[in-house]
Amino acid sequence: MNKDRVLTGIRPTGFLHLGNYFGATRNFLAMQAAYECFVFVADWHSLTTHPDTSELRNSVRRVVAENIACGLNPDQVTLYVQSDVPEIAELYLYLNMMAYKGELEKTTTFKDKVRQHPDNVNAGLLTYPVLQAADILIHRAEKVPVGKDQEQHLEMARNFAQRFNYRYGQGETILPEPQAFNYSGGELVKILSLDGNGKMSKSENAMNTIYLADDDDLLRKKIMKAKTDQGPAEPNSPKPDYIENLFTLMRLVSSPDTVARFEADYAASSAGQVVIRYGDMKKQLAEDMVRFLQPIREKTNAMLADEQYLATVMRQGAEKARASASATLQAVRKAIGVKYY
Ligand code: ADP
Ligand code: TRP
């Protein structure tokens, strides 16, 4: 039986944090067996906003290592770096002829980035969604697990595929239209920043974001500083979102017994009788988080120290990705008619 193809790209612009792990990575791990998965590091995309490449090599190796340490199996999925697959750049060139200046200028992410970097509005930034469409269509991937912010890009990828098929397909679907995909069935967890202000993110203050790379002491320090209050005013009060966030994290890394104990303490607490001790809760959460993250961090560091291993993984991934990409590109060239002998 042919498995559906799922594809996702990760920009190498920062360390993985708990929000990325529980909101995206973990979900992808669950898909490895059920789908034919492609996961790649979008290094070309990062050049649109990060022209300084002094940290690029470290960042790319880190993304690969962290994903494997989290459980991505490079023998099962096709794990590669975008710039190792030149076929993507050629498809990007053809797709650029299907993309109109007006629609590119209207893209929300483009407008945001123009606002953020008014001094670097380059053509690569404008055509970012075209490159993303090439990433997806080069493997004829049907499913792309994306967050809300990427839905517009996916819709554009569908439009480019449709226009390509209409113009050159002669009734055939050369490039299938990819769909947004939510594997967990609508139950994606969202992790808030530890100060309760918005989602945990790499653009937040680093003390409010837990990185998979944080050492044990830093993890403890960050969790102990997480926002709490003096406790609920009434028994069975609804939880403020920063408290709910601590429970969410606890549900993800602690035992069900531990969670149940603190839930019960919370429900029984009121202004006159505060049973729940947030200090104890955070201490417990910190220890459980340390236990959870330690093996991931140690595996990541071991891989980063091993030049050979990561080089082999990237080389193998590139070979697999290029085989799939060149098959699509041949069909594309034939359909367009850029094939003369
Ligand atoms: P960041 O916000 O740190 O820049 P990205 O926007 O690169 O992260 O997101 C990469 C993936 O991680 C996306 O699938 C996104 O939905 C997920 N993600 C990021 N932050 C969170 C969070 N706080 N909670 C849940 N999922 C998140
Ligand atoms: N644009 C995506 C992001 O900002 C990264 C990305 C590049 C991607 N190419 C892709 C995601 C293809 C899915 C499919 O997160």
Image (cartoon, rainbow, N blue to C red):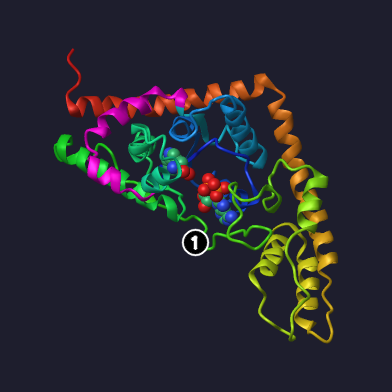
Which secondary structure dominates the residues rendered in magenta? helix
Q: Is residue 228 visible?
A: yes
- Secondary structure beneath dot 1 equals loop
Q: Is residue 214 above or below residue 303?
A: below
**Position of the C terminus by quadrant:** top left
Q: Amino acid at mark 1?
A: Gly
Query: Does label 1 point to a residue whose CB lies under 8 Å from ligand 1?
Result: no
Q: Is residue 3 visible?
A: no
Residue 101 place in picture, x, y as percent: 24, 40
Q: Who's the residue at 66% across and 73% down the image?
A: 240
User: Left or right: where does residue 52 sit relative to residue 197?
Assistant: left
User: Left or right: where does residue 284 sit relative to residue 214?
Assistant: right
Whether the magenta-drawn stretch holds residue 126 is answered as: no
- Magenta-colored span: 83-108
Q: Who's the residue at 44% across and 34% down the image?
A: 45
Front position in the image: 56 or 315: 56
Q: Who's the residue at 46% across and 35% down the image?
A: 49
User: Left or right: where does residue 280 sit relative to residue 55?
Assistant: right
User: Left or right: where does residue 168 sit relative to residue 114?
Assistant: left
Instruction: Give the total number of marks visible in the rendering.
Output: 1
Whether the magenta-drawn stretch holds residue 90 is answered as: yes
